[in-house]
Image (cartoon, helix red, strand yellow):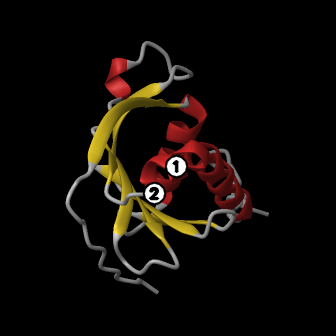
């Protein structure tokens, strides 16, 4: 089942440069690469937020506040890092008055929510390798 959601982007209040831990970026993109729709919905239950990740940006919506984006992480640049375990620079954009305060917890809670989502994914199906010239038993 494919769900379509619409979110609204209010006027930008502020923005700043940040870095995302490599573990967060790598896990987000692992989940994104497995998604058939091009985006992933990540519930951050500890904060009552919903993250929506796609190839362009990660947006964060207060689940009790409707469909208005509070925070967006954009201009995510993995090419700026020298190694896969190095932090990834990005720009955070604040759209809500409380967003700067929310951001203090968001990066850590987002990582936990990504890991929880990854842990709930079913294990890959097993594979059998059959040597050429033999029939399967």
Identity of the residue furthest to the top in this view: 82
Q: How many marks?
A: 2
Which residue is at the front of the view, 53 or 70? 70
Marks 2 and 1 close (CB-CB < 8 Å)? yes
Which residue lies under the disc numbered 1? Answer: 101
- Residue 120 lies, in percent from the top left, at 72, 64
Q: Is residue 110 left or right of residue 19?
A: right
Q: Residue at x 37, y 29 (%)?
A: 78
Q: Name the quadrant containing residue 135.
A: bottom right
Q: Is residue 24 left or right of residue 109?
A: left
Q: Which mark is residue 43?
A: none
Q: Residue at x 29, y 40 (%)?
A: 15
Mark 2 Cα-neighbour bin, 10 Å: few <14, some 14–19, many ≥20:
few
Identity of the residue furthest to the right in this view: 137
Q: Name the quadrant containing residue 128.
A: bottom right
* Residue 76 visible within the image: no
- Residue 114 lies, in percent from the top left, at 61, 54
Which residue is at the front of the view, 89 or 124? 89
Which residue lies under the disc numbered 2? Answer: 98
Identity of the residue furthest to the front in this view: 97
Q: Residue at x 64, y 44 (%)?
A: 108
């Amino acid at each position: 089942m494919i769900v379509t959601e619409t979110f609204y982007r209010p006027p930008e209040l502020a923005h700043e440069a940040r870095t995302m831990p490599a573990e967060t970026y790598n896990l987000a993109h692992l989940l994104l690469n497995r998604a058939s729709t091009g985006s992933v919905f990540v519930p951050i239950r500890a904060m009552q937020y919903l993250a929506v990740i796609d190839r362009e940006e990660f947006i964060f919506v207060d689940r009790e506040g409707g469909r208005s984006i509070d925070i967006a992480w954009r201009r995510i640049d993995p090419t700026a890092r020298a190694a896969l375990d190095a932090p990834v620079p990005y720009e955070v954009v604040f759209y809500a008055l409380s967003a700067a305060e929310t951001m203090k917890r968001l990066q850590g809670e987002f990582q936990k929510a990504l890991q929880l989502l990854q842990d709930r994914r079913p294990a890959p199906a097993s594979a059998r390798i059959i040597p050429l010239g033999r029939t399967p038993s």
